Image (cartoon, helix red, strand yellow):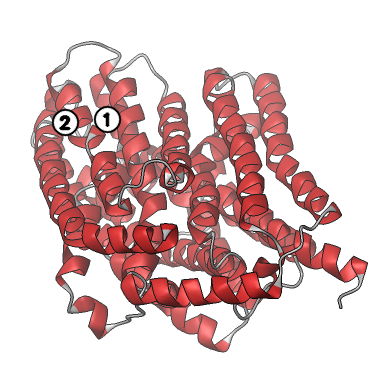
Amino acid sequence: MKGGSEIMLGNSRKWIIVVVTIWLQAFTGTNFDFSQYSSAMKSALNISQMQLNYLATANDMGKLFGWSSGFALMYFPLPAVMFIAAAMGFVSYGLQWLLLQGFIHLPYFLVFVVSVLGGVSICWFNTVCFVLCIRSFPVKRALALSLTVSFNGVSGALYTLAANSIDPSSPTLYLLLNALLPLLVSFAAAFFAPIMPHSPAHHDHSNSNSRDSIMFLVLNLLATLTGLYLLLFASHASAGDVASNRLFLGGAIFLLLLPLFVAYASSWSRPAVHDDDLELHKELIISCKRMLEEEQCGSAVLGRLDFWLYYVTYICGGTIGLVYSNNLGQIAESVGTSCEISTLVMVYASFSFFGRLLSALPDYIGSKLYFARTGWLCIALIPTPVAFTFMALSQTPLALPIGTALIGFSSGFIFAAAVSVTSELFGPNSVAVNHNLLITNIPIGSLVYGFLSALLYDANTNSGVCIGRQCYFWTFVCWACTAVLGLLSSLLLFFRTKHAYQLHDGFLRG
C-alpha cells in the first residue's frame, strides 16, 4: 500500500506534466511570428519576395526532419531531447538576430540552413509534448493533446506582447525572444516536473475517469479565459504603448501560472478504484485497439490509402493556414488595411487557439452525440475556402481580419485534432514517428503555396513592393480551390473510417 505523500505526489505529477507541456507549447511556436520580422529580413538581405518565401518555407522544411525526434527518444530521455530542441532553436534564431543586428554576415544559403534548424527545433519540442501527454494519459490522451496543443496557437500573441513590452520599434527583437524564451521555459519545465515519464505511466489508473474529466474541464475553462483575455484585451493594446503591453503581458503570464495551482490542488484527494475495475479497463483498451488503434509504423503506414487521404486533407487545409500566417505582413501591406500587422497576428493566434481548444469537443459530447473524429476534421475545413473566397471578393476593410480569424480557427482545429487522429488511425505508441511523417506535408505545401503567392505578387510589381488588392487576389482564389480539394479528401477519409469509429463507440458503450 502506498504512503499518503507518495499517493499525493503520483496524483499531482501527471497534472504538473500537463502544465509544463502547456508552457512548452505556448512559447515554442516560434514560427508564428515570422511575419513580424520578415520585412526586416527582406531588407537586410536585399532579397525578393520569392526568396523571402523560401525562408518562410525553410522554417517549415525542418518538419522534413521531424521524424528524427522519434528516433532520438529511443536513445535519450525526454529531458535530454527537450534541451537539444532548445539548443537548436537558440543557435538558429540567435544567428539570425546577430545577422539583422549587423554583428555578423551570413550568405542567403546559410540563413536558409539555420531557418531549417529552427523548424527542426519546433518539431522536437512538439514530439516531447505529444509523448508526455500520451504516456501520462493513455486513456484521456485526446483531451490532454487538444488542451496542450491549443496553447501553441497563442505563441504569436505572447511574443507580440513580449516584444511590444520591451521595444515595439524593433522587429529583430522577435528573433532574440525566439532564441531565449524556449530555453528558459525548458529550464522551468525541468524544475517543476523533474521526473518525466520514460515509459507508459501507470499512475493514470489511480484516478477515476470522471475526476480526470473534471480536471480537464477546469483546465479548459482556464485556457478559454486565457484566449479571451488575449483576444479581447491584449489584442487591442497599441503597439507603441509600452506600459499597457507590460500590463497585459503580466496578466497573460499570471493566467499561464494558474493551471500550476490547479495541478498541485489535485493532490489533495484521490478517489478509490478497485483492482477489478482496473483489469476491466485494461481489457477494454486492448479490445478497442484491435478495432481502431492498431499499431502501424513506417512503411506499413505509407502503404495505406487512409494515410494519403489524411495527408492531402492536412496539406490542403491546415498547411494553407500556416502559409497564410507567414504572409500576413506582406498581405496587410499590399491591401493597405487599417489594421496593424501585430493586430492581425494577434487575431490569427487567438482564433487558432480557440480552434485548437474546440478540438476537444468530440470527447466532451461523445456520450450524447458521437461523431467520428475524422468527421469533425472535415467540418473544421469548411471555414478555410469560405474565408479565402470572402477575402478575394469582398471590398470591405473588415474582410482581412474576418478572413484571418476564420483561417486561424480552422487551421488551429486541424493542428490539434490531427495528433489524436494519427494516434487513433495508426496507433498511439507510434505517434512520435507517424505524426512527423504526416507533417512532412507542411514544407512541401509551404514551398508550393509560397512559390505561387510570390510569383503572383512579383508579377504585379516592378519596385519590389506591390500595393493593391490585385497582389493577392489570384492567390486567394487558388488557395480557396485547394482548400476545397482538402475538404473532398477529408470526406473520403471520413466515409472510409466512420465504421471503425462506430465499432469503437459501440464497444465503449456496450
Q: Are marks 2 and 1 in contact (CB under 8 Å)?
A: yes
* Vertical arrangement, residue 282 with respect to residue 91, above or below: below
As displayed, is residue 451 above or below residue 287?
A: above
| Rendering coords of residue 73 (x, y %) | 53, 81
Q: Residue at x 11, y 25 (%)?
A: 470
- Apparent side of residue 506 relative to residue 99 in the rendered image (left or right): left
Quadrant of the image for the N terminus?
A: bottom right
Residue at the bottom extreme of this rendering: 75
Query: Can you give x and y, in whole percent of width and height, for residue 412 in the image?
Result: 39, 43
Q: Earlier in the sequence, mark 2 or mark 1?
A: 1
* Image coords of residue 143 (percent x, y): 52, 52
Q: What residue appears at the point 65 percent right and 30 percent down from the top-left corner?
A: 165
- Identify which residue, 203 or 229, lies in the foreground: 203
Residue that label 2 marks: 472
Residue that carries the numbered disc 1 in the rendered image: 331
Mark 2, other Cα within 10 Å: few <14 / some 14–19 / many ≥20:
many
Instruction: Tell me the residue at 56%/42% (across/down).
Output: 173
Query: Front-most of 266 and 88?
Result: 266
**Quarter location, residue 194:** bottom right
Mark 2 to mark 1: distance in Å? 7 Å
